[in-house]
Image (cartoon, grey):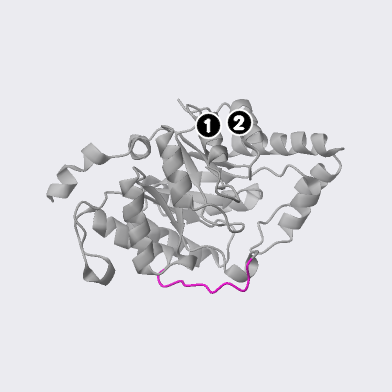
């Protein structure tokens, strides 16, 4: 209990924002495909003062710089990071070790995710691990943060507390199973949840009705994922990928008929802004995560045009 009483002293500013009930804005970046930290530092500077935190994804679309290293660089730039940790690639020993290392670097916001199967990525011959899933990792980190034993019934001095998050899947089937997993994540200690990218507003609204009926939005901060489609050909390929992102044909048509690449990019930004504005009307939705797969200028345009800039 002593750890609980002292928790406020080590609370991250992002966790304080989550607890405040105020709107939340997060940007997500992918670390560079190399060891040069310049791009990470540049991204941190671009988003400083405009978002409440920067999420750093963990080898989601290929082999990249360690997310832990990138998160440490962002923290050193004075911007608060959210470290994504995928259980696909590590056993429980490595996962807990990485989280303790994150704490040593001043990184306490951790988004736990199981990750897409490696056969759906660029390195299908890699061996997956999946020793534990994202909910089990979250539960272990929550126990560590309150002085309890977790992995192999072992406790660690001065571990945590962490501000834990997870992923919400509004478009995955069966919906009832996904809602059960969502509730388990909340029970395991998720202070925030970020949805997969939203394109199908009708289906998202139906999912949100079920979320609010269960009161899950009152137990954790739920952010809608916004990932603009900035190129018609890339969007078409993305729509056909697995797991399917459920992009309505009307959106693909709007991009395809927009004109040249510059016009397509502008149309994609406009669509994202429209999505933000429509989702902003949902009672209980706490905010957004903007992810542009490296086009930080587009993300900043969406933030500005939507009036989302962190306050």
Q: Kindly report the distance in space between the C-alpha atoms of the residues bearing marks 1 and 2.
A: 8 Å
Residue located at (80% from left, 43% from top):
255
Q: Is residue 219 left or right of residue 124?
A: left
Residue nearest the viewer, comparing 174 with 19? 19
Q: Which residue is mark 2?
A: 300
Q: Is 34 in front, or is 198?
A: 34
Percent position of residue 258, x then y: 84, 38
- Residue 304 sits above or below residue 15 on the image: above
Q: Which residue does the image show at 18% across and 47% down from the upper left?
A: 4
| Place of residue 110 in the rendered image (x, y in percent of width and height, measured from the top left) | 40, 50
Q: Main secondary structure of the magenta part?
A: loop
Residues at marks 1 and 2 touching, judged by CB atoms closer than 8 Å? yes
Residue range in magenta is 123-132
Which secondary structure lies at badge 1? helix
What element does badge 2 sit on? Answer: helix
Is residue 46 one of those drawn in magenta?
Answer: no
């Amino acid at each position: 209990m002593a750890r609980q009483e002292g928790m406020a002293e080590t609370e991250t500013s992002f966790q304080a924002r989550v607890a405040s009930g105020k709107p939340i804005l997060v940007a997500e970046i992918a670390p560079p495909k190399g060891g040069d930290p310049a791009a990470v530092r540049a991204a941190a500077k671009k988003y400083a003062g405009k978002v409440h935190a920067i999420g750093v994804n963990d080898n989601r679309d290929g082999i990249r710089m360690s997310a832990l290293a990138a998160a440490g660089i962002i923290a050193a730039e004075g911007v608060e990071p959210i470290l994504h940790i995928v259980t696909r690639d590590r056993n429980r020993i490595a996962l807990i070790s990485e989280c303790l290392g994150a704490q040593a670097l001043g990184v306490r916001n951790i988004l736990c995710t199981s990750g897409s199967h490696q056969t759906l990525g660029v390195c299908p011959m890699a061996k997956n691990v999946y020793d534990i899933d994202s909910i089990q990792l979250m539960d272990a980190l929550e126990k560590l943060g309150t002085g309890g034993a977790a992995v192999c019934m072992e406790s660690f001095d001065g571990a945590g507390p962490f501000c834990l998050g997870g992923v919400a899947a509004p478009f995955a089937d069966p919906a009832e199973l996904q809602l059960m997993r969502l509730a388990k994540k909340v029970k395991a200690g998720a202070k925030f949840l970020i949805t997969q990218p939203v394109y199908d507003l009708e289906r998202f609204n139906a999912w949100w009705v079920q979320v609010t009926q269960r009161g899950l939005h009152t137990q954790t901060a739920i952010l809608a994922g916004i990932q603009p489609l900035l190129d018609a050909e890339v969007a078409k390929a993305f729509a056909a990928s697995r797991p399917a992102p459920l992009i309505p044909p009307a959106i693909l048509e709007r991009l395809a008929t927009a004109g040249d690449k510059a016009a397509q990019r502008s149309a994609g930004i406009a669509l994202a802004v429209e999505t933000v504005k429509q989702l902003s009307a949902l009672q209980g939705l706490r905010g957004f995560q903007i992810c542009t797969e490296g086009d930080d200028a587009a993300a900043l345009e969406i933030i500005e045009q939507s009036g989302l800039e962190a306050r």
